[in-house]
Image (cartoon, rainbow, N blue to C red):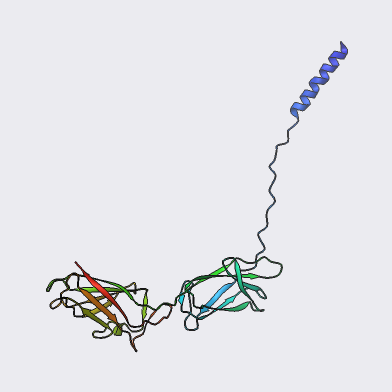
């Protein structure tokens, strides 16, 4: 009987101790921080030139132009030049971090994207610095036109023509001079006397205006528009390709 009482007492004492022992809360392990990549500082392009003008990324250049890239990067680094995922060339920076790299635009039209990276010892290659060049070997020329039928003493007749691309004009007064570098010819019974010339804001579309009192345009007739640039008037595209004499035939619409 005494043994049973002792065992009971011991059992109750153990329960009391266990019940009052504080439990240790579970903790979520703290993740080990990941250090940022030890990258080389990316290079900066300071100037890009085709020998006659400074280029911005996306600008067009003519065939066979030497394009010179001047930049700044970390001292004594390797500058790699990529097209896509392919390294096409490399150069080095000096103690001052400057570098120069040249590329010839060749004779193939297209868009060329160059990515420049820097790499110094004991560091990973930098993120790329991009520059885009559009190679354009096509001269500007008249590509299309339109005119609507207009009876004698109707509305002022107009002919609208368009170049294949935006043009650059060295002297707008010469470009719009009448008589000057624009000529028109008519077929059938249409008659058109050129009085004013206007280049639109898109630098591609030209509106030729006739004479309200004397002119008429008859549906179905053919109109010829000729543009004949000559010195001192100089017309080029944005790449620098010179515009030659160009003509377009316009059918008068109803």
Which is nearer the eye, 193 or 37? 193
Residue 208 figure quarter: bottom left
Q: Quadrant of the C terminus?
A: bottom left
At a point 66% along the width and 61% down the height, the residue shown is 37
Q: Quadrant of the N terminus?
A: top right
Question: In the figure, is residue 184 to the left or right of 44?
Answer: left
Q: In the figure, 26 relative to 161: above or below? A: above
Question: In the figure, is residue 201 to the left or right of 31?
Answer: left
Residue extending furthest bottom?
A: 231
Residue 184, image x and y in percent?
23, 80
Residue 103, image x and y in percent?
55, 78
At a point 80% along the width and 22% down the height, the residue shown is 13
The number of numbered discs placed on residues in the rendered structure image is 0
Which is nearer the eye, 154 or 216? 216
Question: In the figure, is residue 217 to the left or right of 225?
Answer: left
Which is nearer the eye, 214 or 6? 214
Residue 33, image x and y in percent?
68, 53
Residue extending furthest right?
A: 3
Q: In the figure, 87 relative to 23: above or below? A: below
Residue 39, image x and y in percent?
65, 65
At a point 49% along the width and 78% down the height, the residue shown is 107
Q: In the figure, 54 relative to 24: above or below? A: below
């Amino acid at each position: 009987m005494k043994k049973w009482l002792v065992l009971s007492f011991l059992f109750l004492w153990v329960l009391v101790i266990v019940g009052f022992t504080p439990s240790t809360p579970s903790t979520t392990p703290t993740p080990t921080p990941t250090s940022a990549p030890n990258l080389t500082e990316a290079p900066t392009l300071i100037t890009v030139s085709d020998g006659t003008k400074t280029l911005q990324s996306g600008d067009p250049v003519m065939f066979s132009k030497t394009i010179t890239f001047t930049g700044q990067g970390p001292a004594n680094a390797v500058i790699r030049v990529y097209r896509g995922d392919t390294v096409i060339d490399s150069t080095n920076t000096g103690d001052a971090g400057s570098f120069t790299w040249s590329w010839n635009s060749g004779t193939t039209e297209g868009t060329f994207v160059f990515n420049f990276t820097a790499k110094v010892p004991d560091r990973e290659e930098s993120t790329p610095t991009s520059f885009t060049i559009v190679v354009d070997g096509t001269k500007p020329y008249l590509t299309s036109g339109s005119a609507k039928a207009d009876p004698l003493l109707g509305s002022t007749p107009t002919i609208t023509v368009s170049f294949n691309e935006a043009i650059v004009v060295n002297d707008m007064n010469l470009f719009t001079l009448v008589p000057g570098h624009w000529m028109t010819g008519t077929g059938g019974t249409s008659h058109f006397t050129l009085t004013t010339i206007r280049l639109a804001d898109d630098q591609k579309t030209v509106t030729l205006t006739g004479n309200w009192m004397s002119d008429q345009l008859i549906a179905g007739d053919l109109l010829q528009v000729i543009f004949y640039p000559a010195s001192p008037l100089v017309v080029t595209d944005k790449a620098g390709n010179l515009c030659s004499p160009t003509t377009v035939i316009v059918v008068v619409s109803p």
